Image: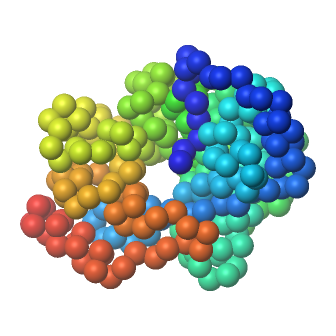
Amino acid sequence: LKYGVGIGVREEVAPKEHYKAFDLLIEKNLFMYHFQPIVNAKTGDIFAYEALMRPQGETLKTPLDVIRVARQQAKMYQIEKLTWHKSMQAYINQIESGNISPDAKLFLNSFSSQILTDEDFNDYEQRYVQYLPNIVMEVLESDELDEGFARRKSEYVRGWGGIIALDDFGTGYNGDYSLILLSPDLVKIDMNMVRGVDTDENKQKLILNLISYAKRQNIKILAEGVQTHGEMEKLIEFGVDYMQGNYFALPMFTPAQISEATKQELIEVNRRING
């Protein structure tokens, strides 16, 4: 489950017990992170892992629950800061346990409406300097876009040697404007666009238009939410660079590897389509 509640979507006011549950989550640090691999669409090799929050409370059980309460309590900054730190710490723990290659990049979510203070960014640099070039900052396209924050965060991440990804493209409220403003290195096609793309001609046209634009701008394309062989094959035909989804591996606390059979399947599809 991704972060985010769309702008303009009316939210029910959370009951007071949810506020207490939120404060307890923060106080007790009741968060785990699961990791889902992102694969090279030509080879099946793991390019990166996305860190996905899993709250461990009894009341607030999903990231969406946590974000809803954080917004209503004006505590989104706490979630932004927590996400940057906890996802990186979990990633480092998995590297040190031998479950993630130190060459694999880390996709972490960042809210367009939030930014760490310069003091917090400097502290972050000192703590994680070795891993900063591995960061792929996912800017949530469904979240309200603050131009100043977006530019400053991008400057920090690119200064570290990391890259910028525009997340959930195709379902947000900023659309093509985000592409122009952020000049991302990578765009993630939302899973709702990917679902059934092998049979839906309208989705095919939209994705082909995006890929055509991205290629001209030297932007990489990642299709998320891939669930079937047909979707995978159509996306390879279209020329996406990376893929993510349950067809390859589920998000797990101990990160999954990609089977040799799946890698061979990708290679064979590429050989048949691209020669």
Indicate the quadrant containing the C terminus: top left, top right, bottom left or bottom right.
Answer: bottom left
Q: Nearer the viewer, residue 17 or 177?
A: 17
**Is residue 122 something that shows in the picture?**
no
Q: Nearer the viewer, residue 150 or 236?
A: 236
In which quadrant of the rendered view does residue 272 lie?
bottom left
> At 13% from the left edge and 61% from the top edge, which residue is drawn?
274
- Counting every numbered tag in the picture gives 0
**Is residue 231 something that shows in the picture?**
yes
Q: Nearer the viewer, residue 237 or 196?
A: 196
Q: Position of residue 186 (x, y in %)?
A: 44, 45
> At 82% from the left edge and 49% from the top edge, which residue is drawn?
25
> Is 47 left or right of 58, judged from the image as shown?
left
Q: Position of residue 78 (x, y in %)?
A: 81, 39
Position of 168 relative to 253 (above/below): above
> At 55% from the left edge and 20% from the top edge, which residue is drawn?
9
Q: Position of residue 205 (x, y in %)?
A: 19, 33
Q: Nearer the viewer, residue 62 or 37?
A: 62
Position of 172 relative to 211 (above/below): above
> At 75% from the left edge and 52% from the top edge, which residue is drawn?
58
> Is 212 left or right of 93, judged from the image as shown?
left
Q: Position of residue 215 (x, y in %)?
A: 29, 42
Which color scheme does this rendered protein use? rainbow
